[in-house]
Amino acid sequence: MVNGNKLNFYETELSSDNFKSQTCCFTGYRPQKVNWEFNSSSKEYLRVAGIVENLIQQSVIKGYRYFISGMAIGFDTLCAETVLKIKAANPDVKLICALPCKEQDRYWSDLQRQNYKRILTQADAVRYVSEKYTKFCMQKRNKYMIDNSYLVIALFDGQPGGTKSTLVMAKKSGLNILLISP
């Protein structure tokens, strides 16, 4: 299901032949999986944010136009915010939010939900891979991102979990992968 007000963009541009070859997705850790504070007062956060911005800028120069974020708290959100920042100076850049379900933010804090909704309203497309939460909706979202991308930017250091399984899927699918060490 696609967010109604973003439907036209989704049906036209995202179904074009060039979409996948111009698309990058993100995968990475949530705040509890890194040993530093996931906020702008953290030196490590600022280091990662700078690397992300640089990699996205380089990707745009190489012809990437579409960027898919799974919108989980942490790295996904950082990447989405960075895409929006770059998009402000380059309107050809598009943010697609691939959400596992409509209630992804159900247990988040008010501040996290406000930030999430702000990003969604600024996105060029919002794609729900499942109507409701299921045991496998996160994996289904990750598969959607991999199936529709050619490049992955990841915050990863080998820990088991969703990021690792997404990168295994990306490697099997032949995607280019850029790794950032947390």
Image (cartoon, helix red, strand yellow):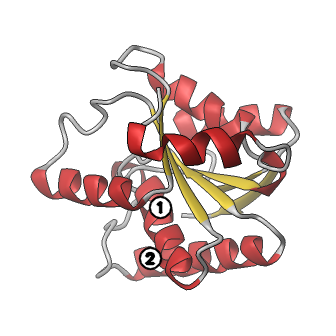
Q: Kindly identify the residue that appears in the image at 39 percent across and 62 percent down.
A: 122
Q: For the image shown, how many numbered marks are present on the structure?
A: 2
Q: Measured from the top left, where is residue 32 in percent x and y?
A: 34, 50
Residue that carries the numbered disc 1 in the rendered image? 80
Q: Nearer the viewer, residue 163 or 174?
A: 174
Disc 2 element: helix
Disc 1 element: helix
Q: Nearer the viewer, mark 1 or mark 2?
A: 1
Q: Nearer the viewer, residue 81 or 118?
A: 118
Q: Is residue 168 visible?
A: no
Q: Measured from the top left, where is residue 40 in percent x and y?
A: 32, 78
Q: Kindly identify the residue that appears in the image at 43 percent across and 68 percent down.
A: 81
4 relative to 137, above or below: below
**Callout 2 crowding tier (Cα within 10 Å): few <14, some 14–19, many ≥20:** some
**Amino acid bearing label 2:** Glu
Q: CA distance from mark 1 to mark 2?
A: 18 Å
Residue that carries the numbered disc 2 in the rendered image? 44
* Marks 1 and 2 in Cβ contact (< 8 Å): no
Q: Measured from the top left, where is residue 14 in percent x and y?
A: 68, 44
Q: Name the residue furthest top.
A: 135
**Callout 1 crowding tier (Cα within 10 Å): few <14, some 14–19, many ≥20:** many
Sequence-first tag of 1 and 2: 2
In the picture provided, is 140 more to the left or to the right than 18?
left
In the picture provided, is 139 more to the left or to the right than 177?
left
151 relative to 147, above or below: below
Q: Measured from the top left, where is residue 146 in percent x and y?
A: 70, 37
Q: Kindly identify the residue that appears in the image at 77 percent across and 48 percent down.
A: 19
Q: Which numbered disc covers residue 8?
A: none
**Amino acid bearing label 1:** Ala
